[in-house]
Image: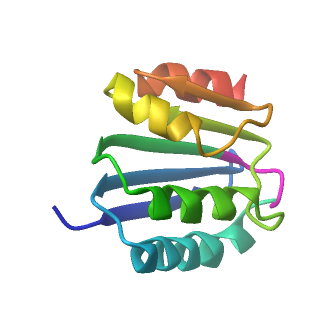
């Protein structure tokens, strides 16, 4: 499955909603980073909230995990809180390797993730 992603800014909640699916290359990560950054002016960023649904994302190669990790560490995209919605333990474990900072949690249910983000 090819990489697919969708980013939607919710200025009222200062929230970025992201859905990701498939298998990413490092070039796909760069395309995603560009799309994400293009929406940040709609939010109070950095310091916004981010909800990432990775339920349909495949396990990624180390180089792609590294590229995503670098993106998440970038000061211009850093979220105050970051919630991942995962459907498998393996996907959760891989996402946990992206960052070890405070303000990041993992959920199986999107509504629970959003409640935590906005709470």
The residue sitting at the front extreme is 62
* Coloring scheme used: rainbow
Q: Is residue 91 above or below residue 22?
A: above
- Tell me what residue is drawn at x 76 percent, y 32 percent: 103
Estimate the x, y position of residue 27 in percent, counting from the top left: 43, 80
In this picture, residue 6 sits left or right of residue 34: left
Farthest residue to the left: give it.
1
How many discs appear? 0
Q: Residue at x 59, y 34 (%)?
A: 83
Could you tell me which residue is drawn at 32 percent across and 26 percent down?
A: 88
Determine if residue 99 is in view.
yes
Q: Quadrant of residue 81?
A: top right
- Where does the N terminus fall, quadrant-wise? bottom left
Quarter of the view holding residue 108: top left
Magenta-drawn stretch contains 83 = no
- Whether residue 85 is visible to the viewer of this picture, yes or no, is no
Q: Which residues are magenta?
A: 45-49
Residue drawn at (78%, 37%) of the image: 101
Q: Is residue 45 left or right of residue 112?
A: right
Give the overall secondary structure of the magenta segment.
Answer: loop
Q: In the image, residue 71 lies at what x, y percent? A: 65, 64
Find residue 47 and report its horizontal and vertical position in percent: 83, 51
Q: Is residue 112 above or below residue 20?
A: above
Relative image position of residue 52 (x, y in whole percent) = 50, 44
Q: Nearer the viewer, residue 48 or 3?
A: 3
Quarter of the C terminus within the rendering: top right
């Amino acid at each position: 499955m090819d990489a697919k992603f969708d980013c939607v800014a919710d200025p009222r909640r200062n929230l970025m909603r992201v859905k990701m699916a498939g298998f990413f290359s490092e070039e796909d990560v760069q395309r995603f980073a560009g799309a994400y950054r293009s929406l940040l002016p709609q939010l109070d960023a950095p310091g916004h909230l981010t909800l990432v649904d990775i339920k349909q994302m495949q396990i990624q190669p180390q180089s792609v995990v590294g590229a995503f990790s670098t993106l998440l560490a970038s000061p211009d995209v850093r979220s105050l809180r970051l919630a991942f919605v995962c459907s498998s333990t393996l996907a959760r474990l891989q996402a946990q390797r992206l960052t070890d900072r405070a303000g990041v949690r993992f959920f199986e249910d999107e509504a629970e993730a959003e409640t935590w983000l906005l709470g």
